[in-house]
Image (spheres, rainbow, N blue to C red):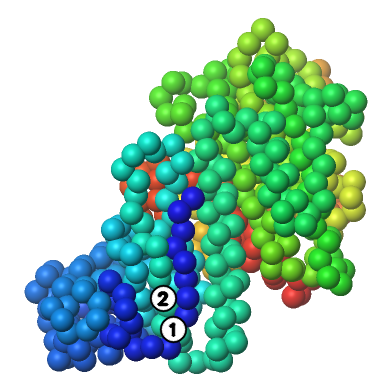
Amino acid sequence: MILPKLALTTTAVTEVAADAVIVGVIQEGDRVGLAPGAEAVDAAFGGELLAVLGTLGATGKPDEVVKVPTMGRMTARMVVAAGLGKPDPDGTVTAEQVRRAAGAAARDLCGVSRAVTTLSTVDLQAAVEGTVLGAYTFDTYKSENKNGAVSRVDLAAPADGTARQHRATLKAATAIAEAVAAARDLINTPPNDLYPASFAERAAAMGKAAGLEVEILDEKALRKGGYGGILGVGGGSTRPPRLVRMRYRGPKARTKVALVGKGITFDTGGISIKPATHMEEMTSDMSGAAAIVATTVLAARLGYPLEIVATVPMAENMPSGAAYRPGDVLTMYGGKTVEVLNTDAEGRLILADAIVRAAEDGPDYLVETSTLTGAQIVSLGRRTAGIMGSDELRDRVAQLARATGEGGWPMPLPEELRGDLDSKLADLANVTGHRWGSMLAAGIFLKEFVPEDLPWVHIDVAGPAYNNGSPWGYTGKGGTGVPVRTLAALLADIAEHG
């Protein structure tokens, strides 16, 4: 990954030895207005910066970036005006508006060595996250034409708060953004290099570097342990499955949180093979696992006063003579049996094994995330996760997801859909046999493996985890790292409130 170096500055932004000064602009009806922090820059233009921007067609709308040469009026050679959109009725802008504007500006600064931003005076944490993630570049496989992403960004210190508080915010926000970037790196790594064994090794290396306890179960250990779902799904590949367990014990931890993430390193659909169109995007079917690995490492880096155990199943779903078939019955970890009606509903099978194992640790909460259903995209689009589970925890997570800017919406688990998962051969089937409420039915399937008294949540990020469209805000093409920031906010909330 390529990420910029960040530093706080109390030097006037017009005097910082930077190539560009980033300011925020807002939509004010038919005009453009300046966000807080841009006063010195405006003064350098004799109070005419808005007039110049208006002449260049600036509107202040989200994702808009307009560049103005300074013509020697300040140390930097150009001003970069980043659109924040319309402020709230009371004149304030949200953290997500700042995050998105900072990301758009960072994406537009290719070829710029150093910049200074005033967006940090509006919301320091949001400016840090947006800057880091907007500047993120994955160029591991580029042989030439490396992207010249901005290498350093100075952040104007906010007027409120102390220098110590600002440094703490910078440290935490940088750690969170780098965790998202780490998840993006895993997602963007092609499946010929990221397969169950190599993914497990990378997760272990990340975990051990952060001081975590790490255990890897190979195919022999999985067979001995009775992990029928993971073995069934992974049986068609020449690259056998893995189960990674990562444990973090924080200082004075009173609450234990189980984290589970789906790690299908490539999903052909198996015997129920997918259409060829866009199948290359199925390299992202391990996004849930990437988010869980990155979040567990982040928890150690930030020192959350929690005990966290991540259980991450990894498999490659391939068609072959050894692949599991529609009509097979799998005995899952813990003893329940599942009739396979569709081998492309594989994620819930490996997750069921992992959920049962995670619950054996006696956690206070169980949090699982996965690119589980195409129905999530049909229902909620590509930017809004579907969140299911225990009512109170589900709503808590959905609220935090929206607060972080990642987005999420609470969804029900209707009792009437459970009967559609009945099987004539086994305890239940892996799909309903119809497409109505498919996202919810997948959540209901997972619920069957969660102890009744355990608060749990399922976050379906099939759409939000991967951007196959144009870049926007701080989100480039490819893996997004969603829902790392939501998970981080949840862990912080649990650490504070239980």
**Up/down of 106 relative to 314, above or below:** below
Residue appearing at x 61%, y 14% in the figure = 319
Occupied quadrant, residue 287: top right
The structure residue drawn at horizontal position 16% and vertical position 73%, both measured from the top left corner, is: 69
Assign the C terminus to one quadrant of the image: bottom right
Using the rendered view, name the quadrant where residue 345 is placed.
top right
The reply to whether the C-beta atoms of the residues labelled 1 and 2 are less than 8 Å apart is yes
Q: Which mark is residue 9?
A: 1
Give the left or right position of residue 142, taking residue 234 as reference.
left
Task: Determine whether, in the image, residue 465 is placed left or right of residue 241.
Answer: left
**Residue found farthest to the left:** 55
Give the secondary structure at mark 2: strand
Q: Is residue 19 above or below residue 448?
A: below
Residue 494 is situated, as x and y percent measured from the top left of the image, at 74, 68
Left or right side of 415 for 83: left
Front-most of residues 330 and 253:
253
| In-front residue for pair 199/474 | 199
Residue 174 picture quarter: bottom right
Residue that numbered label 2 is attached to:
154
Residue 149 vs residue 480, the one in the foreground:
149
Find the distance from the CA under tag 1 to the CA under tag 2: 6 Å
Q: Residue at x 44, y 83 (%)?
A: 9
The percent position of residue 98, horizontal first and vertical second, equals 41, 72
